[in-house]
Amino acid sequence: MIALFSHNNMKRTITSRLTKIALSSTLIVAGFIITIDSSLAQTVTYEATLRSQDAKARINLRAEPSLTAKQIGYGLPGDKVTILDLLRGTNNQTRFPWIKVKFVKSGAIGWIRGDFVNTPLSILTSTDPKSRINLRAKPSSSSQQLGYGLSGDRVMVLGCETGSDQDRTPWINVKFVKSGATGWIRGDFVLVPLTFC
């Protein structure tokens, strides 16, 4: 079951067959524009804004999701982009997702490191790509398990909290993009730039 929302009256519509729906909806969630075009088998696009601590910074646009990839352009803080894809970083860059973007004004497409894109969209990660990542009712490993996600699943970050566990692990409140399931996941399994939480 997938939940979709109509932009006219924010009425919830539930359906189990996305391919039969010819609906395009737009939501504004926490200031982010989210468009769900279910006629394209759940294509979800997110508009976001580039950000940097330095207001005059040039934010590199790369051909591939890596700091060593060819620079094909740059953006500036405040530029509007549409998010096309997310990937986990490689080598020593694993804490940040790489985000494939399309610039709203120029149409340029490329990869930008996730901490330069202001978005609640993130990705689950694990050292074992086949492991199940527990979704919990509360921010604690002893809390009820509601379900699980897999490495690579896309989630919306709803909030962050330091857990009550002994190690004081940060926990991330998430909503799965595909299923709509919500709950808490340990912070080491969600690629969230430290500037977000």
Image (cartoon, grey):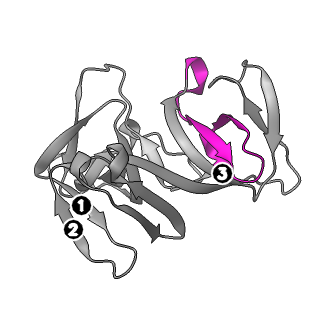
* Span colored in magenta: 90-117
Mark 3 vs 1, N-terminal side: 1
The residue closer to the viewer here, 79 or 166, is: 79
Quarter of the image where one finds residue 102: top right
Residue at the (26%, 49%) spot, across then down: 165
Which one is closest to the eye, mark 2 or mark 1? 2
Is the Cβ of the residue at disc 2 closer than 8 Å to that at disc 1? yes
On whether residue 137 falls in the magenta region, the answer is: no
Residue at the (42%, 49%) spot, across then down: 44
Q: Is residue 60 left or right of residue 137?
A: right
Type of the residue with mark 3: Val
Is residue 144 shown above or below 93?
Answer: below
Residue lying farthest to the right in this orientation: 56
Residue at the (22%, 50%) spot, across then down: 20
Question: Is label 3 in a helix, a strand or a loop?
Answer: strand
Mark 3 vs 2, N-terminal side: 2
CA distance separating discs 3 and 1: 25 Å
The residue closer to the viewer here, 85 or 20, is: 20
Mark 2 vs 1, N-terminal side: 1
Is residue 174 shown above or below 133?
Answer: below
Q: Which residue is mark 3?
A: 81
Question: Is label 1 in a helix, a strand or a loop?
Answer: strand
Q: Which mark is residue 13?
A: 2
Q: Which residue is mark 1?
A: 3
Type of the residue with mark 2: Thr
CA distance separating discs 3 and 2: 28 Å
